Structure formats: C-alpha cells, structure tokens
Image (cartoon, rainbow, N blue to C red):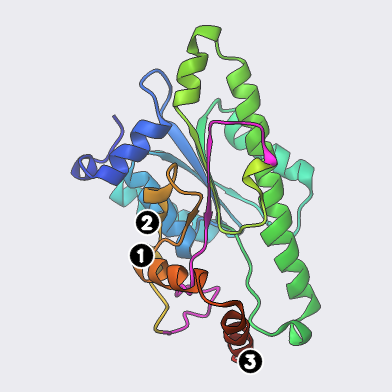
Amino acid sequence: MYLKKDTKDEANYKRLHNRYSSPNEAQPYALVTGGSEGIGKEFALELARSGFNLLLVSRSQEKLDKTKKTILEQSPQIAVETATFDFSNFNPEQVKDLYKNLVIDQSRNLRILLNNVGVLGSKRLLEEDPQMLQNMIVVNIFAQTFMTKYYHLYIKERDSKLPYNLSAEAERKRYGEIHLSSFISERSSELRYIDYEIVKPSLVKTYMTGFKEHWRAVDPYEVPYGVFRALGQQREAYGAFKHICWGTITKYEPHPVRVQRLQYDGRQKN
C-alpha cells in the first residue's frame, strides 16, 4: 500500500486507493493540469495523501517546483513529476506529445486525469478584452477536450494489451476523470470503466478570482475532499460544504429568479 501512514485509515483515501490501484500493477499516477497553485495544488496534495504519484502540468516551472517541494514534504512516499505547458497556446499534436513523454514512454500507470486548468475573465462580455475571451475558449474548452481525448486513447490502448485473463480485473480497477467544466459529455467515450465527474464549485479564493472575499467564497483546501468523496459515486460535485448547500438551493430555484440573480451578478463585475 502506498497510503501515507497517518491517513491510511481515512475512508476517503482508502476508497480512492482501492478503486484506482491494484497490487498487480505499478503505483498509480494522477495527472493534474493547472496543478501549481489554487485548487489544482490542493487537488494534488489530496491525491498525494491517497498514495498517488503525481504528474503536474502548468505554465510556470518556478511555481511547479515550489508545489512539488510542498507535496514531497507532506507525502515523501510518492513521486512527483512536472512539465511546463502553455494551455493558452498549443496544438493537438503537442498534447499528444505531452502524454507520450510523461506517461507512455515512461510506462506509467495513469489512473486519474484532473482537468483543472482554466481561465476566468473579470469583466462583462462587451467590455472584456478580446485576447482574454480567446484564452478562455482555448484553455477552458480546447485544452480539456484534447487532454480528455488522449487520456481515453491511452486507456484504450493500454487495456487492449492486457492478457485476456486480466481483462475482468482491468475493468474492476477503474479510471477517474474529473472536469472543472461541464461541456464534455460523459458519453464522449465508449469506455465503460471511467468514473466521470463534473465539478461545479462556486466562488473560491484564488489568484484567478482575485482572492475575492464573499459569504459564498471558500479557501482552495476546502474543495478537494468533497470532490474525491463523490468520484465514482456521483456525476456532479460541488466540493466544499458551503458550495454543496448553495448548489442544492440554486438547482431548484425558479427560472425567472435564476435569470434575475445572474443579471445582478453580471452587473457587479467591473
């Protein structure tokens, strides 16, 4: 077992380890995009406590190095590899090469993809800078689409090489896939053994949100535990307890009320 000793009896950590690893395979890896700060960093720390080796991908090597140091200080039993990648300026072949260099060529047992990287504009649509709008489309849609595509291809090719008598075991030991966006359909792949989850956090105090103070805002460390607790059991998750409450309330609000609330929120932007 690769669990950190002081967390091995925690139900969430043990469940993740049992669901996504096997004693017949190498220690599992999780790939986290935008994993150098904010929610991504907290996701990485939580996965490390669960015994997952980490592949962290972000734009700044300096931030990646700092995060790697923090993770290894807390969970020295795991391995952390980093790679720089600019998700606002790439082509699909570069994503394919990223998987090849980080995962395939190293024969790593990748079990969880966490599509965390994202960009958020601070102004209303008509006032937002065109370059920011383009970055939002490229990072929030294109990047997640191609990261997911090549993850699915990796899984399909990897499992096709397993001996026939291990096929049943391969399906029982599942793969995880988490998106901080809801545009990718769970039906986008024919692979039945992927646990697919969309994360819908409300306001989180990070650099991307300007560390905004609000009654609904939570710290990044409050999000991951609830997300991983739901992985493999729910298709959607809000993460932090405060966001679970808010998401449940807004899920059932009448449409006219929702429209008025969103218009009000929009007017609050600079």
Secondary structure type for disc 3: helix
User: Does the segment drawn in magenta span residue 208?
Assistant: yes
Q: Quadrant of residue 125?
A: bottom right
Mainly helix, strand or loop, the magenta region? loop
Residue 76: in sight, yes or no?
A: no
Q: 134 or 141: nearer the eye?
A: 141
Which residue is tagged 2? 226
Q: Quadrant of residue 220?
A: bottom left
Name the kind of residue labelled 2 in the image: Gly
Which residue is tagged 3? 267
Which residue is tagged 1? 222
- Residue 135 spot, x, y in % from top left: 73, 67
Residue 246: in sight, yes or no?
A: yes
Q: 13 or 80: nearer the eye?
A: 13
What range is drawn magenta here?
188-214
**Quadrant of the image containing the N terminus:** top left
Q: Residue at x 23, y 39 (%)?
A: 8
Name the kind of residue labelled 3 in the image: Arg
- Residue 208 spot, x, y in % from top left: 55, 73
- Residue 204 spot, x, y in % from top left: 46, 72
Q: Residues within 10 Å of mark 1 (few under 14, many from 20)?
A: some
User: Are the residues at dot 2 and dot 1 in contact (C-beta closer than 8 Å)?
Assistant: yes
